[in-house]
Image (cartoon, helix red, strand yellow):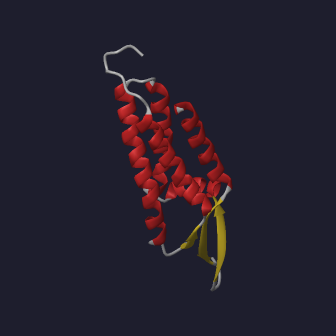
Amino acid sequence: MRKRLGAIALGVFLLSLVLPALVVEQRVLLGSGSHIHTMVGAQCLALGFFLWPGWLANPLLLIAWVLGALARGRAGYLAAATVVAVLAVMSAVFAAFLLAALDDPRLVTLHVGYYVWVASTVITLIDLILTPRTRPDAPA
């Protein structure tokens, strides 16, 4: 079950990269006016690096996946991965509020890709919570 949830989380994350994630209104650089632009998840991943702390969910999610893969039932790794996954979920949810506060580009609406991205963080967290833990001194 755990391996399936981890694979589902990764698949859902990859799916979020090709789906439309945000609709923003950007001002025209020269002149007046603005235009509406739909960004897919991959664009958000690439450009989101400049928009902290909402983008922080991506490296946190990667760290949670790595710690979860290294855990193999060890309680310390699983606890660390779970904490990092909680932070990733919080950062992903907070990203919407951060985007709503921007002036340029102005967020028009969140699209399905954003919700799929948040779902990948939540699935990762559920996966780590459901993983059985062993005593720290027990061999893996």
**Residue 16 left/right relative to 76:** right
Residue 112, x across and y down, in percent: 61, 62
Of 30 and 87, which appears nearest the observer?
A: 87
Q: At 40% across and 54% down in the image, what residue appears?
A: 90
Q: At 44% across and 32% down in the image, what residue appears?
A: 131
Of 32 and 138, which appears nearest the observer?
A: 138
Of 57 and 13, which appears nearest the observer?
A: 13
Q: At 41% across and 28% down in the image, what residue appears?
A: 132
Asked where in the image residue 85 lies, by quadrant, the reply is top left
Q: Is residue 112 visible from the viewing direction of this image?
A: yes
On screen, 29 above or below 88? below
Quadrant showing the C terminus: top left
On screen, 30 above or below 64? below
Q: At 45% across and 42% down in the image, what residue appears?
A: 126
Residue 103, x across and y down, in percent: 49, 75
Residue 107, x across and y down, in percent: 54, 72
On screen, 76 above or below 27? above
Residue positioned most to the right: 18
Quadrant showing the N terminus: top right
Residue positioned most to the top: 139
Q: Is residue 52 visible from the viewing direction of this image?
A: no
Count of marks overlaid on the render: 0
